[in-house]
Amino acid sequence: MAEKKTRAPGGGRKPLDPDEAQSVKVMVRITSARRKQLQDLADKHHGGNLSREIKLALKHWVNRHEIPQLYNSALGFAIALLADRIERITGGKWAADPGGKGAADPMTREIVREHVEQLVSHLLPPSPEPIAIPVDIKEDAGLLLTLFIHSISRAGSQRFAGTVIIDDPGLATILNDLARHLGDGSAANVETRPELVDRRKQGEKAGADAAWADAVRTDTTDAFADYVQKFPSSRHVAKARARLAALEKQKGRK
């Protein structure tokens, strides 16, 4: 009679993480060159786990595109491209590799810092007239900057103690990613909670619905264009675009 095999303590299949447990299969064709790029990244970051690398890449891409305005994405890309080309010229790196592998080159760092400042000044020149910024907006923007500084820590920079809880899952993902690539190697510890995310979504939906009602009541190209710009992911955006196109067509006939 065969002896029944028993698993050693801790043996057997490991429990799946929540994302894996709730996953579905998606078939997609990619080029051999693209697959090799993904596999190289998987070998570097996840012990060769290609599936995990692809899922993390898709998660980052989706969260990245929660930034609705193209010019904001273009601003980040312009800075990244400038820094990359300067590194090609100098042959050095402006930042150390994650985990402290490879030191930053002081000359490259200074050139990148100087030229990024000039690029930002070129794209965002100071206003010729003084602008009064509401206190609540200034405080919110300042808190956001503090959150970035917390995540991308430097020697001597102040950080929040413990775990930081925010209501924006896309921002949390990107801040943790920035901490890995630009920080000092320590985790950002920025997380979300489902109840906070739900509350944020409810507030955004209420604001979008109120703005939609205003746009319908006003019924002008400016009103619908403003709605599309401010609420590109709302449930009314398709109707707003359609009405905007109809109003612009009516203008063209006059």
Image: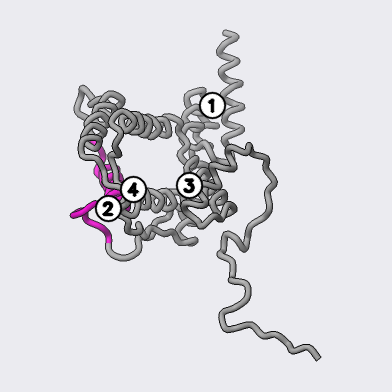
Label 3 vs label 1: CA separation?
A: 22 Å
Mark 2 lies on residue: 153
Position of 186 relative to 85 (above/below): below
- Asked whether residue 147 is in view, the answer is no
Among numbered discs 4 and 1, the one appearing first in the sequence: 4
User: What is the quadrant of residue 69 in the picture?
Assistant: top left
- Residue depicted at 44% across the width and 52% down the height: 173
Say which residue appears at 20% left-offset and 24% top-offset. Answer: 129
Task: Quickly name the residue at label 4.
Answer: 97
Where is residue 186 shown, x and y percent of the image?
32, 58
The residue that mark 1 highlights is 219
Specify the quadrant of the image occupied by residue 79: top left
Identify the amino acid type marked 4: Asp
Work out how far the residue at label 4 is from the one at label 1, CA to CA, in angstroms.
53 Å
Residue to which mark 3 is pinned: 204
Would you place residue 162 above or below residue 55 in this image? below
Element under label 4? loop
Looking at the rendered image, the disc whose residue lies closer to the viewer, 3 or 2, is 2
Q: Nearer the viewer, residue 59 or 184?
A: 184
